[in-house]
């Protein structure tokens, strides 16, 4: 189960992950929405924190 998750994570991102065996990409599609959610949260949090610190309209745009 975790092998499929990490296989999908390495496929959809640039995060290098050493896998113990050859990845089965046909079984990783169920994890694509979860990985998309994780990537979007990781991208959104720094922007949210900086928008509180920097109140410039250019940053918000």
Image: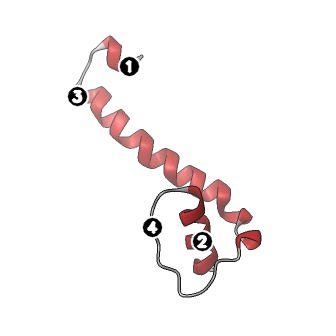
Q: Residue furthest right?
A: 26
- Residue on which disc 1 sits: 60
Name the side, left or right, on which 16 lies relative to 47.
right
Chain-order first, disc 4 or disc 1: 4
SS label for mark 3 = helix
- Neighbourhood count class around disc 3 (C-alpha, 10 Å): few under 14, some 14–19, many 20 upward: few
Q: Of circles 4 and 2, which is in front?
A: 4
Disc number placed over residue 53 in the picture, else none: 3
Marks 2 and 1 sit apart, C-alpha to C-alpha, by: 35 Å
Q: What residue sits 43% from the left and 43% below the top?
A: 43
Chain-order first, disc 2 or disc 1: 2
Name the quadrant of the N terminus.
Answer: bottom right
Marks 3 and 2 sit apart, C-alpha to C-alpha, by: 36 Å
Name the quadrant of the C terminus.
Answer: top left
Marks 4 and 2 sit apart, C-alpha to C-alpha, by: 10 Å
Chain-order first, disc 4 or disc 2: 2
- Residue on which disc 4 sits: 16
Chain-order first, disc 3 or disc 2: 2
């Amino acid at each position: 189960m975790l092998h499929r998750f990490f296989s999908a994570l390495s496929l959809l991102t640039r995060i290098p992950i050493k896998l113990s065996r050859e990845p089965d990409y046909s079984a990783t599609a169920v994890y694509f929405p979860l990985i998309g959610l994780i990537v979007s949260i990781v991208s959104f949090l720094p922007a949210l924190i900086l928008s509180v610190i920097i109140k410039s309209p250019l940053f918000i745009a």
